[in-house]
Amino acid sequence: MMRIACIGEAMIELSMAGEDAQLGVAGDTLNTAIYLHREAPALQVEFVTCLGDDPFSQRISDFIASQGVGRDTIHRIAGSSPGLYAITTTEDGERSFTYWRNASAARQLFADLDFSILAGFDAVYLSGISMAILPHPVRTALVAWLETAQVKVIYDSNYRPRLWENEAQAQQITKGMWDRADVALPSIDDEMALFGETAAQVETRFAGHRGQGALKRGESGPMSLGSQVTQAYPPAERVIDTTAAGDSFNGGYLGALLSGKSQADALMAGHQLAAKVVQHRGAIMPE
């Protein structure tokens, strides 16, 4: 059985509705892990993170287990707690986010520079958010470890400027990860913002990527990386909430690809899943 480690941060989510708040759990790589497990239950999907010993950390751990994702690789840190964010929505449906994550336990992931927990996996999946929350020496050490590790590396840059100390470090780490990634899952908007390129320049750069993957381009559909695929991608019937559109695409694509399906089938699986997810509110669509 193939084992995949999804690395990152899981947070408590407060979704505001007037004076009331609905409590949930979210995180970009966790969202992908959940959809990956749903699409390919024969694969063993584990989530790698740090949590505290508080009730909210336990709530996150219980949620992960309830979604069929493994939690044996979650490290619990006494006295720590997870990050938190709140979603507020205007009358016309526009969403805004407020974060409290500077003291998140996940920021202590790999603090001892020991990455051996990843050595037993067939593939590791991580994102720019996974990297951004780590101290820069840990990021660079992780990139260096991955360069020689006998593991399939899957990366989504998922660029969030506020999480990085500066643009130069974000560019350095992202370039290093694209050089190493066996499967690249960039979003065209993120790459344009991070590297100051046009859409055409981003497409040209990734056309020469060393491995497989998909350049996510929203309504235009994904551009195949590693092999040429020509097929039409029908748009979603309606769009209610784009939260986790990219995360769910990744889960659908990887579920198909890692199960042995063709690149064309994997691209379509990712697109179709994302098209369903954007028709529901929240990151995790009901099963």
Image (cartoon, helix red, strand yellow):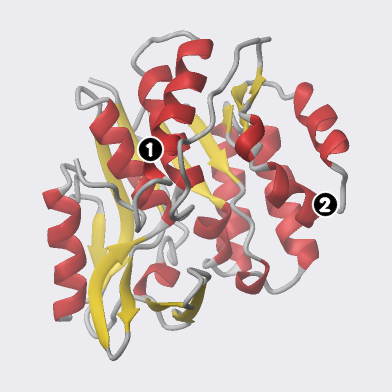
Left or right: residue 114 compared with residue 193: left
Q: Residue at x 75, y 71 (%)?
A: 166
What's the amino acid at mark 1? Lys
Indicate which disc residue 276 carries: 1
Q: Residue at x 75, y 29 (%)?
A: 206
In the depicted structure, whether residue 93 falls above or below residue 265: below
User: CB of mark 2 within 8 Å of CB of mark 1?
Assistant: no
Label 2: which residue? 195
SS of the residue at dot 2? helix
Q: Nearer the viewer, residue 274 or 138?
A: 274
Q: Residue at x 40, y 10 (%)?
A: 261
In the depicted structure, whether residue 39 falls above or below residue 190: above
Q: Quadrant of residue 81?
A: bottom left
What's the amino acid at mark 2? Phe
Looking at the image, tell me whether mark 2 or mark 1 is earlier in sequence order: 2
In the depicted structure, whether residue 159 falls above or below residue 253: below
Residue 214 rendering spot, x and y as whole percentages:
60, 28
Evaluate whether residue 282 shows in this view: yes
Crowding at dot 1, Cα within 10 Å, few <14 / some 14-19 / many 20+, comes out as some
Residue 98 rendering spot, x and y as whole percentages:
48, 81
Indicate which disc residue 287 carries: none
Left or right: residue 195 compared with residue 188: right
Q: Nearer the viewer, residue 194 or 124?
A: 194
